[in-house]
Amino acid sequence: MHVLQSVIVPGLAAGAIYGLVAVAFATLFQTTGVINFAHGQLVMVMPMSILVAEGAGLPVWLAYLVALVVVLVIALAIEWAAVRPFMQSGHSVSWLLSTLGVSVVLAEILAIPYGGEARNFWHGVSSRRVEIAGTGLAVSPAEAAAVATLLLVGGLLTLFYRRTRLGLELRAIADDLDGAESVGISRARASQIAMILSAVVAAVTGVLVASTQPVTPSLGMSYTFYGFVATAMGGMGSISGAIIGGLIVGVATQAAGVYIGGLFVNVSVFLLLLAVYLIRPHGFVGVAPVRAV
Amino acid sequence: MNMVDLRERATQAATAAATAVRIRAERVRDTLPPPVWRLLAAPSLHSVVMAAIVLALLASWGPQSYHGYVTQLICVYAVATLGLNITTGYAGALSLGQGAAFAIGAYVTGVLVSTYEWPFWLALLLATVAGLLAGAATGFPAGRLGVIGLAMMSLGLVLVVGDMLIQFRTVTGGMFGIPSITARYWFGQDPAESLWVVPIVIVVVAGLCYWLHARYRVSRLGRSTVAVRDEPIGASALGISGYLTKVAAFAVGSAFAALAGGLFSLLSGYISPDAFSSHLSILFLVMVVLGGSGSRFGPVVGAILLVIIPLQLAEYPHLNTIIYGLLLIVLMRLRPRGLFSRSAAPAPQAMRPLFDAVAAAAPAGSAESTPPEPGTAAPAGPADRTPAEPTPIMAASAGERTPAENEPTGPRPRRGTEVLRLTDVRRSFGGVDALAGVSLSLARGEILGLIGPNGSGKTTLLNVVCGHYPPTAGEIHLGGEPIAGRRPEAIARLGVARTFQTPKTFDGMSIEEHLALATAQGDRDPELLRACRAGALALLEMGGLDPRHPASLMRESRVMSHGQLRFLEAATAISTCPRVLLLDEPAAGLSAAEIEGFERVVHDVARAGIGVIIVEHHLEMISRLVDRVVVLDLGKVLWTGPPADLHDAESVRAAYMGIV
């Protein structure tokens, strides 16, 4: 029971956040072949913007709306400057560096409002734990919401890609950019839609992150890293893989934090990544590509 | 729309300006005799000159002055950046973890010098070794990964090292760091009194590192590293294995960074974890990318610019970081290869054996191996100054053709000994049998034509022989030795060379470097060696690549046309002096004259004893050149026979030409 309470429950909640980051990676990667290294920062933009807007005297609901618009505008700017030019180009160095550049810029801009200090966020889901009758387990609404959101987002996206025409178009682009363009699918529109989807996921993730811990701009890079490890575990571009990977990373970090010490969280994630690459370089769900000569 | 226009115009302007500068520089270079500009381009000379300039500057400002400090900081960062250029520029492995190795080096040096009172030189040496080990440790698992995996592994390393610096506070001093890091010459001695010790160490080490970094690029290892970066499959076909080049680049790059970290702790006298955030790694990366990753000067220029510019902007605290982030985005859009975009390096020794082979053949009176000489010696002169002019090249290839017409292609003695045998080789992809049991054998000196409709398994057959795809079943013997299932590098080293349907040449390397990569393996028959080298030289001349003019040999292959790349690739493959040469549609996209020249070379090297398999749709070429034709259909051998009988075979007509 103790392990459940101290490791599994908070681990799954944290893992849900990493899973959401990984799902957003997969969404963008599937269509554009780009992993947005600025995604962690984009996640932090949402709560920071809410705080700033609310600090400027806006009512909370309006602050949410303004923040969402800010996230979307920034996301589209990223898409234009750092994603679309390198869409399905195979030159990973180019997009890696350009989205890394975006990440540096965003992190610095986020550090301006409160001098990079942590701020408490009161406008999210409650993080007070409630005991679930008969089990002796205490779970906070924020933790439950994180896991529920992950499953919901994953399910919706899977349906979207399988059942809707738009979803199919986004996947067609991923398979063959030139072919898809020749049957009238716009590359710009596809990449924008993929970016908007991942930005909406980022906005939701941001609110969930801020509900469980103080808002610190420098968290962005860690989320990018943890989310990426989740992606690597699941396999690039796989949504179910991202969900599973995220939850595993979450539980592993929580276990490392509880049993070894807070400074070993990054070490545990690093070792996890190392293990994945040594054992299954293409993830647990992903498939090794056929080597083309 | 407007933005797009603007962007395009900016890109064009930048490219045009860079090209103008390059052309002017090349013109100046062309007025100097080759030995002079080879000397001027020598990295040892650059190191000495740069170190002298920096020392002079330091002397005029004083080592303790603000400017003196900035100059030394530039040198320290330049060392780390040069190291990163080996990892990222040469090997193409994007490292976000250069700051981690830098921190490791700084702390090893700091702890040894400050806590244990070690002499600084020994501490620096240990720091370098620590960096080397840390780099190898990350590189070993990561060497198998793509760009993204390596980037993330190295990013993880930065986070881990940052945490560990705080975790082991009894050694590292935790958040407080390590104070009073001073340089002493020997254990337990008092720190050196002279203010010049640290500055001189920094400048000398920086100069040495520049030289080492340039030497690494022209070493066999460095050249292989760049080849693997540009075209891993092409490199494996030349017998170069990719994995170790990546691990070595990672380890050496880390060693440089750790050494730089050690110098940094000596320079600042105090270190704490704040100095080594993940921003530092990104800063190093921007320095390399801005300067031009893979170039020789780029990293130095990047380090200079990105130390000085932020200092100028120091009064606006956030602007600094925002600017280098933006710089990264803009660079990737407008000038992804940085300010100094040249990544080819000289390899003057590569051409000598080729010329020697031709010269040695000339007095012997063997007309076949020398025909390029009379044809090109004259046109090569005017072609020197204006390589873009098409006329001399045309003249060269026309002159080339004459002896071929005058001289009937004599019968080739069939040596008879078998060099390659395939026994019931199968290869399936999923449910598709690309090869459904192919058996054939190839003799020394034989030219075998492999034809068949698209999808009949011709290229798959070549890929299976080369080891790019292991066969699903069956045996392949090269000179009696089983090679099925071996790695492509190993098979290439046993003497199998090939060309690809689309040339797999190395974008960032010069012509002479391509030839330097392709050294002959083992002890080959000298006559064979000579024929191969003469053939390679003839191919270069035919391709208009002007092997007698050093400036033309130093052009990067990314600026060459498709036809030129085809000749370059074939010349590279032949100059490895293989036992078996596999040519995949060599005639595609070549003119009739070029095809004829190509045939002559293939004929010559086959007569010297190489077994050749040639996949081609050009049936006239097949009927002129080959001894035996094998027709593949649906992964099976449909027909085998002399080319003269090909048109009469009914089954072939049905399958291949669609007429019965």
Image: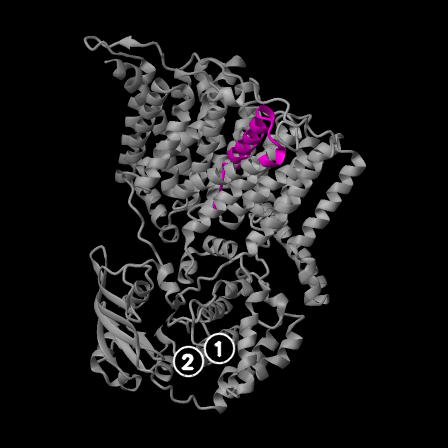
| Residue B309 rendering spot, x and y as whole percentages | 68, 35
Question: Which quarter of the picture shows residue A39?
Answer: top left
Are the two marked residues, 2 and 1, in contact with CB atoms closer than 8 angstroms? yes
- Disc 2 is placed on an element classified as loop
| Span of residues in magenta | B93-122
Report if residue B339 is visible in the image. Answer: no
Asked if residue B405 is positioned above or below residue B387 in the image, the reply reads below
**Dominant secondary structure of the residues highlighted in magenta in the image:** helix
Q: Earlier in the sequence, mark 2 or mark 1?
A: 1
Q: Residue at x 44, y 21 (%)?
A: A65
| Residue B621 rendering spot, x and y as whole percentages | 38, 80
Asked if residue B397 is positioned above or below residue B61 in the image, the reply reads below
* Chain ID at mark 1: B
Q: Residue at x 34, y 64 (%)?
A: B466
* Residue, disc 2: B608
Question: Which quarter of the picture shows residue A223?
Answer: top left
Q: Residue at x 39, y 19 (%)?
A: A261
* Chain ID at mark 2: B
Q: Is residue B236 left or right of residue B309?
A: left
* Residue, disc 1: B530
